[in-house]
Amino acid sequence: MSLDLTDSVQRAQNGDTQAFAELYSLVYKDLYRTALLGLGHEQDASDVVSDTVLDAYKNIRKLRDPASFKAWIMTILTVKIKNKQKEYMTSRSLEEDIDDHIEDTPDEKKDSFGGVELTEAMATLSEEERTVLSLNIVSGYTSEEIEGMTGITANTVRSKIKRAKEKLRKMLE
């Protein structure tokens, strides 16, 4: 991370709301894309990102290393995604939510997300596969960094990413 980002984190830790807004603007797209790939539903992704940002804002003073801000906020997001995925299992299946999302999404939005086929293919992956794949592909985290965020060993992360990519490749052929 750059020194400017570290400076913004330190200012945010001292109560500077404008500095936190700057940080938010730098990570929002990655947060949203990761949440959308992990959940498959725009509204839930937005809700999870909002909850994540609120928790980060409330707890930014607890962040020990300002240089690790992005990994820290992505860890918060990952926990929130897992909690939302658990909610899906108790209320309604993720597949039904994705089907609803696909039917309600205008064609231009489907195209901007990579198409209905990709959305449907992502729905066939396990929760862990979607999470590690989105953290790796969308946010660019290494398997070691993902291990720190999810508690899944780096070797397992690499295996899950490889299997998920193979599944997607087969489904999209």
Image: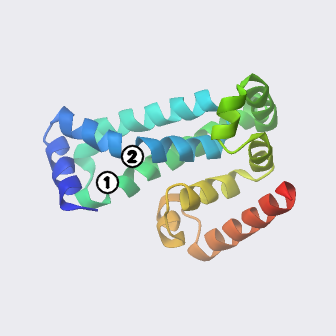
In which quadrant of the rendered image does the N terminus lie? bottom left
Q: Is residue 25 above or below residue 126?
A: above
Secondary element at tag 2: helix
- Name the kind of residue labelled 1 in the image: Phe
Tag 2 near tag 1, CB within 8 Å: yes
At a point 52% along the width and 29% down the height, the residue shown is 47
Report the colour scheme.
Answer: rainbow
Q: Which mark is residue 69?
A: 1
Q: Residue furthest top?
A: 104
* 9 lies left or right of 167: left
Q: Is residue 76 above or below residue 15?
A: below
* 135 lies left or right of 52: right
- Image quadrant assignment for residue 157: bottom right
Residue denoted by label 2: 27
- Image quadrant assignment for residue 111: top right
Q: Is residue 144 above or below residue 9?
A: below
Q: Nearer the viewer, residue 170 or 7?
A: 170
